[in-house]
Amino acid sequence: MSEIIYGIHAVHALLQRDPSSFKQVYALKGREDRRLLLIIQQLEKLGIIIQLANRKWMDRKIGNAVHQGIIAKVTPGRQYQESDLDIIISQTESPFLLILDGITDPHNLGACLRSAEAAGIDAVIVPKDKSAKLNAIAKKVACGAADSMPLIRVTNLARTLRQLLQQNNIWIVGTAGNANHTLYDSKLTGAIALVMGAEDEGMRRLTREHCDELINIPMAGIVSSLNVSVATGICLFEAVRQRRVIMARLPDSI
């Protein structure tokens, strides 16, 4: 079993993390990109044969996506199960989780994973249905974050919120345009799960009902909403800011 990844950042990230997962690599014939050549040199040192291909073949291979001159067939990475969420929560002092409810665009999924990894999220949770697949597009946009960030697909998101999160005293913060207070008025420290809704409709009703708090991002201009991946990054890093302030105030351990 194998899967396709492409793009300089995605291939380089996997090369650093798990070089044994590469099965076949295709590089664009005649491309003299320094970053690409460095990756090819590293792959060749590992004994991986690089097959040269023309642009037309490579474009057709991945549906005309932007491959940056490199495509790889690799062993699929670890697939996380619902049971892994219990383990992650139990092993983390103050879990910091991201829940994506109905994000169906793989570009947005990849961008959210990238922001989540940069913000130090412990796991990203998505529903099994009505959610983008972690495909080559998402992995390219994630720039390597998809290989290191636990992505957990759950059968029933509302049940997960109720049974796993609320029973573990994790504060569930949902985002909604009509919330009565803003992101900057909320306390985003401690054990929290941030819920981001779908690109067009926001959170589903049952998801919203299981949130402990609803917040919005204050908008000063004529634009009424933000792309979900942009909104996710804003919310995550406000939480990061608050958590760092709290850590800075704690006395040094003896």
Image (cartoon, rainbow, N blue to C red):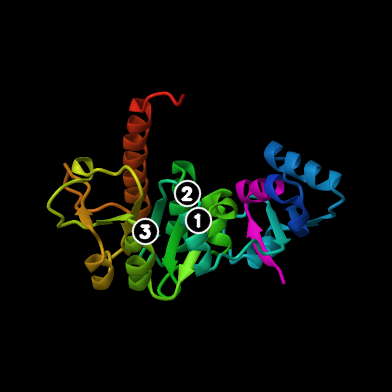
- Judge left or right: residue 234 versus residue 11: left
Q: Are marks 2 and 1 in contact (CB under 8 Å)?
A: yes
Q: Nearer the viewer, residue 123 or 225?
A: 123
Q: CA distance from mark 2 to mark 1?
A: 6 Å
Q: Are marks 1 and 3 in contact (CB under 8 Å)?
A: no
Q: Which residue is mark 1?
A: 88
**Is tag 1's residue or tag 3's residue first in the polypeptide sequence?**
1
Residue shown at 21%/51% (left/top)?
A: 216
Q: Is residue 61 magenta?
A: no
The x, y position of residue 170, in whole percent, is: 34, 55
Residue shown at 39%/55% (left/top)?
A: 98
Q: Nearer the viewer, residue 218 or 180?
A: 180
Quadrant, the N terminus: bottom right
The x, y position of residue 168, in whole percent, is: 37, 58
| Circle 2 Cα neighbour tier, 10 Å, few/some/many (<14 / 14–19 / ≥20) | few
Q: Which residue is mark 3?
A: 168
The mark lying in front, picked from 1 and 3, is: 3
Dot 2 lies on which element?
loop
Q: Residue furthest right?
A: 47
Callout 2 amino acid: Thr
Identify the image quadrant of residue 210.
bottom left
Q: Are marks 2 and 3 in contact (CB under 8 Å)?
A: no
Q: Is residue 14 magenta?
A: yes
- Judge left or right: residue 60 versus residue 127: right
Callout 1 amino acid: Ile
Q: Which residue is mark 2?
A: 92
Q: Residue furthest left?
A: 180
With respect to residue 127, does 214 lie above or below?
above
Highlighted range, magenta: 1-15
Q: Nearer the viewer, residue 158 or 102?
A: 158
Q: CA distance from mark 1 to mark 3?
A: 12 Å
